Image: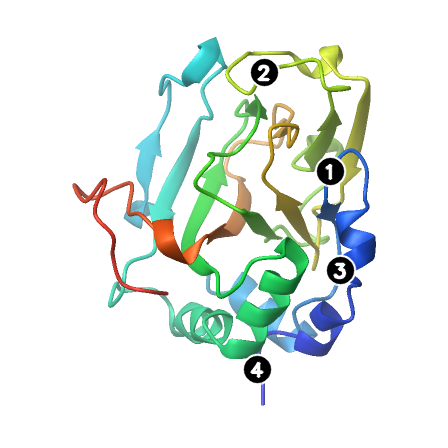
């Protein structure tokens, strides 16, 4: 029995409706984690001391840097037990099949990482890498600690087909901005495409707090590559 995932709720998302969404396939479901599972993960977040500081990193097309602390999951790494258990559930057949159904992807492979963003950080409008089907973004700022006015929502952006993925439009340049709720037990599922623009406006939370997300990157099974740790260009084990 699942301890963390409400897999029935994920499986209830209609794939046809998901794929028909405008401006591209996306969803913002709530309560895909059990209440007990969500609280357990929230109370056992990996410590920022384990993370790599990524600030000022150059991006393609002069896009503004995505400043944050980041931690890439690798097999056997030291993470709190609830997180290891959750990742084990995500590697199960039912989650893989459910995500594959939404993305119309047979037997996808996953990469997992955490991002923590302190005040003044943002995620400039961008499309994800071509090697990906998309991503499942899980949010970990509780309603008790986080004021939605501080930001943190993932924004689905409609460019009307006007921008190339290697360009650098501002949020104000898009025809429509759709906010994915991110406070509490919510997540966002976003398909990668040439029109798959999304981003996060500048975070304005008080010092000492950070926007915290856990991301499942969904990759085709034939091109699952490790980007960090000196293994770029080498295929690695299936997760």
Quarter of the rendering containing residue 40: bottom right
Q: Which residue is mark 4?
A: 3
Location of the N terminus (image quadrant):
bottom right
Mark 1 and mark 2: Cα distance apart in space? 15 Å
Of tags 3 and 4, which is closer to the observer?
3
Q: Earlier in the sequence, mark 3 or mark 1?
A: 3
Marks 3 and 4, the one that precedes in the sequence: 4
Q: Which residue is at a point 32% across and 33% down the rendered structure image?
A: 53
- What is the spatial separation of the Cα atoms under label 3 and label 4, in whole angstroms? 25 Å
> Relative to 113, does residue 122 appear above or below in the rendering?
above
User: Pointer 2: what residue?
Assistant: 164
Observer able to see residue 236: yes
Q: Taking 165 as reference, is 118 above or below it? A: below
Mark toward the viewer: 2 or 4: 2
Q: Could you say whether the residue bearing mark 3 is in a helix, strand or loop?
A: helix
Residue furthest left in the image: 230
Say few, some or many: other residues with alpha carbon within 10 Å of mark 2 (under 14 / 14 to 19 / 20 or more): some
Residue in the foreground of this view, choosing between 160 and 126: 160
Residue 213, x across and y down, in percent: 54, 48
Structural crowding at the residue carrying mark 4, measured as other residues with C-alpha within 10 Å and reported as few (<14), some (14–19) or many (≥20) = some
Q: Which residue is mark 1?
A: 24
The spot of residue 76 in percent (x, y) is 24, 68
Lower position in the chain sequence, tag 4 or tag 1: 4
Residue denoted by label 3: 15
Label disc, if present, on residue 68 of the rendered structure: none
Marks 4 and 1 sit apart, C-alpha to C-alpha, by: 32 Å
Q: CA distance from mark 2 to mark 4?
A: 42 Å
């Amino acid at each position: 029995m699942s301890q963390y995932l409400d897999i029935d709720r994920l499986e209830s998302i209609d794939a046809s409706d998901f794929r028909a969404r405008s401006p591209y396939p996306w969803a913002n479901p709530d309560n895909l984690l059990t209440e007990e599972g969500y609280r357990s993960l929230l109370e056992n977040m990996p410590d920022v001391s384990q993370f790599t500081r990524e600030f000022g990193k150059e991006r393609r097309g002069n896009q503004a840097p995505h400043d944050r602390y980041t931690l890439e999951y690798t097999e056997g790494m030291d993470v709190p037990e609830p997180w290891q258990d959750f990742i084990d559930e995500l590697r199960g057949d039912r989650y893989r099949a459910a995500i594959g159904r939404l993305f119309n992807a047979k037997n996808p492979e996953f990469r997992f990482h955490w991002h923590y963003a302190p005040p003044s950080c943002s995620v400039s409008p961008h499309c994800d890498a071509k090697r990906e089907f998309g991503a499942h973004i899980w949010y970990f700022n509780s309603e008790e600690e986080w004021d939605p006015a501080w930001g943190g929502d993932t924004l689905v952006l409609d460019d009307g087909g006007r921008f190339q993925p290697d360009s650098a439009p501002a949020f104000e340049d898009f025809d429509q901005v759709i906010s994915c709720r991110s406070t509490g037990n919510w997540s966002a599922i976003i398909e990668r495409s040439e029109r798959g623009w999304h981003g996060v406006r500048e975070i304005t939370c008080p010092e000492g707090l950070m926007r915290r997300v856990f991301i499942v990157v969904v990759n085709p099974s034939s091109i699952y590559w490790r980007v960090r740790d000196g293994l770029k260009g080498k295929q690695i084990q299936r997760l």
